[in-house]
């Protein structure tokens, strides 16, 4: 997911050599807002699946899976809000999400764009939903703009 994030957020490289592309990706990584004890609860969600039903069939929770450490804190789902502290992406949150045994299997990167200060295409004063770019890695790779 970090590879996709850096490819989306990097500035255009001076040329398409691997060194220049890597340099631009590293600039993005260095601009990531730090997640620490003061903001981890606001920027991350992690979880572990429990027993339930999948397509009508009873399935065990992660801790009941064969070979799982019964006291494991290993997450099976994570969602992280990522902020890039540079002029280009100021105020644009990126959400990285992935997990196991979700209702739908997916790994994706979602970019929510800022709303414009003035909406020229609206008859009302209602706030329209933010535009978002979704890059899905699995199961059906693709890009969606809403």
Image (cartoon, rainbow, N blue to C red):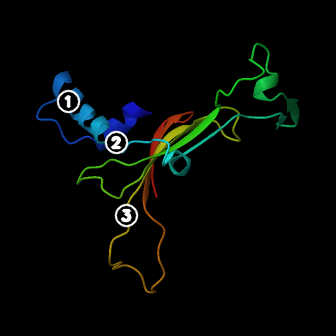
Dot 1: what SS?
helix
- Quarter of the image where one finds residue 53: top right
Rendered location of residue 125, percent (x, y): 45, 85
Dot 3: what SS?
loop
Rendered location of residue 102, percent (x, y): 69, 38
Mark 1 Cα-neighbour bin, 10 Å: few <14, some 14–19, many ≥20: some
Please state which of the two labelled residues, at mark 2 or mark 1, is closer to the viewer.
Answer: 2
Left or right of 30 on screen, residue 129: right
Rendered location of residue 50, percent (x, y): 79, 35
Left or right of 102 on screen, residue 42: left
Q: Earlier in the sequence, mark 3 or mark 1?
A: 1
Residue 108 or residue 91, whichever sits in front? 91
Q: Earlier in the sequence, mark 2 or mark 1?
A: 1
Q: Earlier in the sequence, mark 3 or mark 2?
A: 2
Left or right of 72 on screen, residue 2: left
Residue 133 or residue 38, whichever sits in front? 38
Is residue 124 placed above or below 17 in the rendered structure? below
Q: Which mark is residue 114?
A: 3
Q: Which mark is residue 23?
A: 1
Q: CA gap, disc 2 to disc 1?
A: 15 Å
According to the picture, the residue beneath numbered tag 2 turns out to be 32
Q: Are marks 2 and 1 in contact (CB under 8 Å)?
A: no
Left or right of 145 on screen, residue 13: left
Count numbered badges in the picture: 3
* Identity of the residue drawn at 74% across and 17% down: 69
Q: Are marks 3 and 2 in contact (CB under 8 Å)?
A: no
Q: CA gap, disc 3 to disc 2?
A: 18 Å
């Amino acid at each position: 997911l970090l590879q996709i994030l850096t490819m989306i957020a990097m500035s255009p490289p001076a040329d398409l050599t691997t060194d220049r592309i890597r340099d631009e990706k590293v600039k993005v990584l260095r601009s990531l807002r730090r997640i620490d004890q003061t903001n981890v609860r606001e920027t991350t969600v992690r979880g572990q699946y429990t027993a339930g039903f999948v397509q009508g069939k009873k399935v065990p929770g992660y801790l009941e899976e064969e070979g799982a450490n019964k006291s494991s804190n290993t997450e099976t789902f994570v969602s992280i809000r990522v902020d890039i502290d540079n002029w280009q992406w100021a105020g644009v949150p990126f959400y990285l999400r992935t997990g196991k045994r979700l209702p739908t299997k997916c790994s994706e990167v979602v970019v929510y764009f800022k709303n414009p200060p003035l909406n020229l295409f609206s008859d009302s004063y209602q706030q329209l939903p933010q535009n978002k770019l979704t890059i899905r890695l699995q199961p059906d790779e693709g890009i969606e703009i809403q």
